[in-house]
Image (cartoon, grey):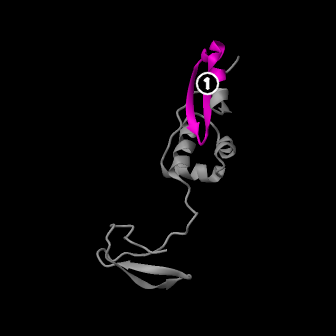
Amino acid sequence: MTVSECPRCQSQNIVKSGVVNERQRYLCKKCNYYFTVNKIGKRIDNYYVTKALQLYLEGISYREIERIIGVSHVTVSNWVKEFKVKKPSHTDYHPTYKIFNHLELVEYLKDKGHLSGAGMIITELGDKFMLIKWERFKD
């Protein structure tokens, strides 16, 4: 893997500067920043970070998000802390969700009985769609 720019200042003026833990070390001549190349495959796509945070804001638990997206609940918790996301308190409602493919979603929405209630949102989730619906707690 070749490095083309500094991750701090995006300068093209970089040189090799030794090896650390069997990884090539580089030095940016412009800002004097030492860095190594990131490991391939260790980053999670921003799409999944965004979806996880959206689901968290909709009231879905960390473990449910883990089952839906396939990312550890600890990772989701770390993202919530990192981005300082605060869940709004709404105790009168709780979310339920269903995952559909395109044709199943169309059939589900044809029934007008499914459209009444407290509220719903549909979001893309990879090649499927997630329908989140809020319902009042029953007394």
Instruction: Locate residue 113: give its quadrant.
Output: top right
Taking the magenta stretch, the answer to whether it contains residue 118 is yes
Label 1 neighbourhood size at 10 Å, few (<14), some (14-19), many (20+)? some
Q: Residue furthest bottom?
A: 18
Mark 1 falls on what kind of element? strand
Percent across and percent down for residue 32 are 33, 77
Instruction: Locate residue 137: give its quadrant.
Output: top right
Identify which residue is drawn at 28% across, 75% down. Answer: 30
Q: Which residue is mark 1?
A: 134
Residue 136 in view, yes or no? no
Which amino acid does the dot numbered 1 rest on?
A: Trp
| Quarter of the image where the C terminus is located | top right
Percent across and percent down for residue 102 are 62, 31
Left or right, 7 with respect to 48, comes to left
Percent across and percent down for residue 19 are 50, 85
Identify which residue is drawn at 63% across, 13% down. Answer: 112
Identify which residue is drawn at 63% across, 27% down. Answer: 105
Taking the magenta stretch, the answer to whether it contains residue 26 is no
Magenta residue span: 107-133
For residue 91, above or below residue 30: above
For residue 93, above or below residue 78: above
Identify which residue is drawn at 52% across, 47% down. Answer: 47
Residue 61 in view, yes or no? yes
Percent across and percent down for residue 107 are 66, 22
For residue 47, above or below residue 13: above
